[in-house]
Amino acid sequence: MSLFPTYKRHPVHFVDGEKAVLTDAQGKRYLDFGSGIGVTNLGHKHPRVLEALMEQARAVWHVSNLFEQPLQVKVAEKLCQITGLDAVFFCNSGAEANEALIKLARKWAKDAKIIHEPEIITFTGSFHGRTLATLTATGQEKVKTGFDPLPPGFRTVPYGDMEAVKKATRTTTAAVFLELVQGEGGVRPADPAFVRELADWCKEKEILLMIDEVQTGIGRTGEWFAYQVYGIKPDAISVAKGLGNGYPVGAVVADSRLKPVLGPGTHGTTFGGNPLAMAVCDAVLTEIGQTGLLEQVREKAEYLKKKLDDLVRSLPAVREIRQKGLMVGIELDEPAAPFIRQLLENGLVVLPAGEKVLRLLPPLIVSEEEIGQAVSVLHQTLSQTKIGV
Ligand SMILES: *Cc1c(COP(=O)(O)O)cnc(C)c1O
């Protein structure tokens, strides 16, 4: 096989998808409670999204950012309206959006605060991507091993530890950067009191508060963005995964005072914000905005919680369940991988998050019936002890 052995893959080939259901090459059907990795939030083959892509594909695919792109303006205006922020930069992935956030914070610190070597505070357990800067920002050693020398300018403190943030804050601190629900780190929602205190601290010290909404964004937690669930106002956010429902796209959305920081020639991308991506994003944002989907996400999340409480929480293999909206982590007493394989065998796709956590990220359009089915498969599979041997 001529691919790098980068991924450990399940021996399953999905050939078709519709809403929350995937079909493999043998015709076996699976309930998709992974949505890729929190990407296909509107499900597979969503009619509005599919039509938007097809229509744009028949017109023009790519023109570069040297020419006007009215669709970028349209989608940016929607993102600004949703967030109350003022400036958008489009790119192609989560890591690229976070990379742009890091560049934005550094250049803002140099321009506005005359800090020559700005620092960014990040947190243990976080995940921000695989580029050199974003893996340095990531608070997990395993993604860094073998890739040093790493860029300087990051200070990692324990997640949720306000005293540590205060101690790590210097005159050279440009920004604090965090996920409000750590996704890859095990579905760990931040403590609301910590988040409020952190937001106040950033304001007081004139430090940027930057939220990585790559996994939590676009409705996943029951609001457009997790920071809205927490009731804070960040200076900038990164968005990706759910934004294109599977079409690769990322974005930085930032406050007006950061707008002048990325002037002509300071940053760029060949593919970012291309017409295909923008047509899809426009359809995704319109669909969620017009259909009352966020309200439904909150209802479905409540239903999922009740079902998990009834059938899964008290199983001997389960240590803890953590949930924000349709983002769920089921922490087990033992490695999750054998259970994930068995769940797949039983027709349910779920994801890992760290070694011992099962992560559920169903599409936001999942039905209550499908939630019931999934929880019943979870109950059945997790009830079997010694599955790993
Ligand atoms: C997935 C993810 C990223 C990285 O996104 P890519 O598109 O894989 O580069 C960054 N931050 C968070 C929180 C993520 O979940």
Image (cartoon, helix red, strand yellow):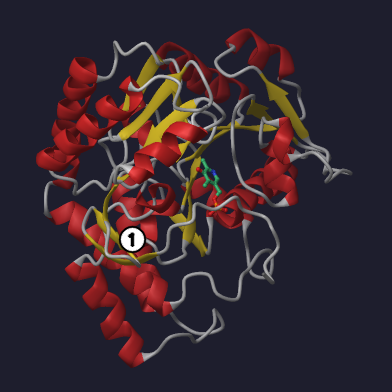
Which is more toward the observer, 323 or 224? 323
Residue 43: quadrant of the picture: bottom left
Seen as rendered, the residue at the extreme front is 389
Label 1 crowding class (10 Å Cα cut-off): few <14, some 14-19, many 20+? Answer: some
Name the residue: 87% across, 43% down: 148
Name the residue: 25% across, 73% down: 50
Which is more toward the observer, 233 or 153? 153
Which is more toward the observer, 10 or 117? 10
Residue 66: quadrant of the picture: bottom right
Q: Is residue 381 left or right of residue 147?
A: left
Name the residue: 45% across, 21% down: 386
Q: Is residue 189 above or below residue 15?
A: above
Residue 269 shows up from this direction: yes
Seen as rendered, the residue at the extreme top is 163
Which is more toward the observer, 199 or 272? 272
Residue located beneath label 1 in the image: 77
Q: Is residue 84 left or right of residue 134?
A: left
Amino acid type for the residue under numbered disc 1:
Glu
Seen as rendered, the residue at the extreme bottom is 59
Q: Is residue 330 left or right of residue 21?
A: right
